[in-house]
Image (cartoon, grey):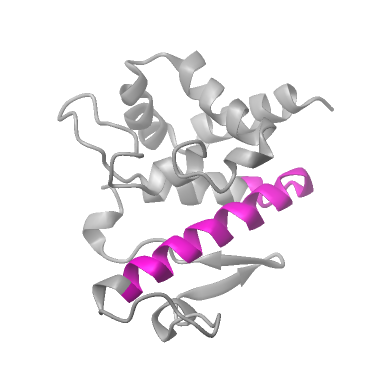
């Protein structure tokens, strides 16, 4: 099966299961479905972009800074965590996305850990272990470690 048909299936699934979340995200593209699909396709077809917050559509979905998707109404970046989790949930059912999910969540976990360490004044961890905060927000879904990428209610993008 070609990647385009896999992305088509993923797109249709999300449009059916999360129509309001998808519609809100599509407003960032002024309703241009092709542009949103291109973001997904370019992310999935370029493994170098998987760790890049500017090039990975999932990382952009959860971002509230300049790398995120700008709301068409306010012009501000708004995290869309629930939609990102829906993508992860559906992608985790297909083994072809396993490396992408693993790499993306690992990159996001490192970003969250560094952000938390800066916030509490610890700086980066020198021993390579995760902070207790990050450890307390991990779970396991079909063998893929998932990071709770929602720190507070206002970061959920709702």
Question: Whole-percent x and y of residue 147?
Answer: 50, 66
Residue 130 lies, with reference to residue 118, above or below; the image says below
Q: Quadrant of residue 131?
A: bottom left
Question: Whole-percent x and y of residue 153?
Answer: 24, 61
Question: Whole-percent x and y of residue 94?
Answer: 74, 46
From the viewer's side, name the closer residue of 62 and 31. 62
Q: Quadrant of residue 151?
A: bottom left
Identify the residue at horizontal 66%, vertical 34% (top origin): 46
Q: Is residue 54 left or right of residue 63?
A: right
Q: Is residue 105 left or right of residue 122?
A: right
Residue 22 lies, with reference to residue 95, above or below; the image says above
Magenta stretch: helix, strand or loop mostly: helix
> Is residue 98 within the magenta segment?
yes
Residue 136 lies, with reference to residue 78, above or below; the image says below
Q: Is residue 46 left or right of residue 79?
A: right
Identify the residue at horizontal 63%, vertical 54% (top origin): 103
Quarter of the rendering occupied by the N terminus: top right
Question: Whole-percent x and y of residue 118?
Answer: 29, 71
For the record, the magenta segment spans 91-117
Q: Is residue 34 left or right of residue 116?
A: right
Identify the residue at horizontal 45%, vertical 75% (top origin): 137
Residue 48 lies, with reference to residue 151, above or below; the image says above
> Is residue 115 within the magenta segment?
yes
């Amino acid at each position: 099966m070609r990647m385009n048909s896999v992305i088509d299936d993923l797109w249709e699934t999300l449009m059916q299961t999360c129509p309001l979340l998808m519609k809100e995200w599509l407003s960032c593209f002024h309703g241009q479905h092709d542009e949103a699909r291109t973001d997904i396709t370019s992310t999935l077809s370029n493994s170098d972009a998987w760790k890049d917050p500017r090039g990975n559509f999932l990382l952009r979905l959860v971002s509230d800074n300049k790398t995120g998707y700008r709301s068409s109404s306010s012009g501000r970046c708004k995290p869309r965590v629930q939609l990102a989790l829906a993508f992860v949930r559906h992608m985790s059912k297909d083994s072809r996305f396993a490396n992408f999910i693993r790499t993306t969540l690992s990159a996001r976990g490192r970003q969250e850990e560094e952000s938390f360490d800066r916030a509490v004044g610890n700086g980066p961890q020198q021993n390579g272990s995760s902070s207790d905060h990050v450890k307390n927000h991990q779970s396991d879904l079909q063998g893929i470690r998932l990071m709770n990428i929602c720190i507070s209610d206002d970061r959920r993008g709702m």
